[in-house]
Image: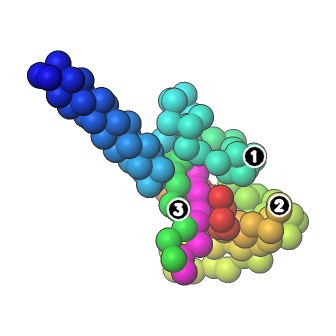
Amino acid sequence: MIKKFMLFIGITALFSACLFSFLFYLFWNPSDVRPDTITFYLKIPEVIKKVELFNPITSPLYGVSSSDGEKVGSTDVYYESKAPLSDLVVELTENGAKCEEFENRIFVCDFAWADGYMRQTTLTTKESSVGIQETIIGDM
């Protein structure tokens, strides 16, 4: 009787651990994910992996934000580039983006992208580089 009870306890604990792990994975929204990690392959959607990086000088960091009720999901990548800000703005507008300049030479460029997604690119001037935040908005 005790062996059956211990077996039941063991199976219940194993099932609980598996259920917790599955739910954690399902609702986990990782950030600052490097391309050389297992998380990159497991959680980062293909749509953001297809974004062309403009002459990166830092390793790109990826993130995911799941949809939640009315909120639409998004995924993003951040990196720094040596490309001149003016060249980046020209490149984006030639590809159909509408760019708007804000204070301190910050540009936000929006455009429709592949498969019904929206793409938003934020360019921020740094001391010797440009910070680039690419965000793809849509249900992943």
Q: Amino acid at mark 2?
A: Ala
Question: Which residue is pictured at 48% across the width and 50% down the height?
Answer: 26
- Tell whether position 73 is magenta: yes
Q: Is residue 130 above or below residue 118?
A: above
- 50 left or right, relative to 94: left
C-alpha distance separating marks 2 and 3: 19 Å
Q: Amino acid at mark 3?
A: Ser
Q: Which mark is residue 107?
A: none
- 140 left or right, relative to 26: right
C-alpha distance separating marks 2 and 1: 10 Å
Question: Which secondary structure, mark 1?
Answer: loop
What is the crowding at mark 2: few (fewer than 14 residues within 10 Å), some, or many (at least 20)?
A: few
Q: Which mark is residue 114?
A: 2
Find residue 55 and report its image quarter.
top right
- Work out whether residue 92 can be spotted: yes
Q: Is residue 78 above or below residue 107?
A: above
Residue for badge 3: 66
* Lower position in the chain sequence, tag 2 or tag 3: 3
- Tell whether position 42 is magenta: no
Task: Please state the extent of the stretch shown in magenta in the rendering.
Answer: 70-82
Q: Nearer the viewer, residue 72 or 76?
A: 72
Residue 113 x %, y %:
80, 65
Residues under numbered marks 2 and 3 in contact, where contact means CB atoms less than 8 Å apart: no
What is the crowding at mark 3: few (fewer than 14 residues within 10 Å), some, or many (at least 20)?
A: some
Q: Residue furthest front?
A: 1
- The quadrant of the image that shows the N terminus is top left
Residues under numbered marks 1 and 3 in contact, where contact means CB atoms less than 8 Å apart: no
**Secondary structure character of the magenta stretch overall:** strand
Find residue 35 and report its image quarter.
top right
Question: Which residue is pictured at 21% across the width and 23% down the height?
Answer: 4
- 19 left or right, relative to 100: left
Query: From the viewer's perspective, is the residue at label 1 or at label 3 nearer?
Result: 3
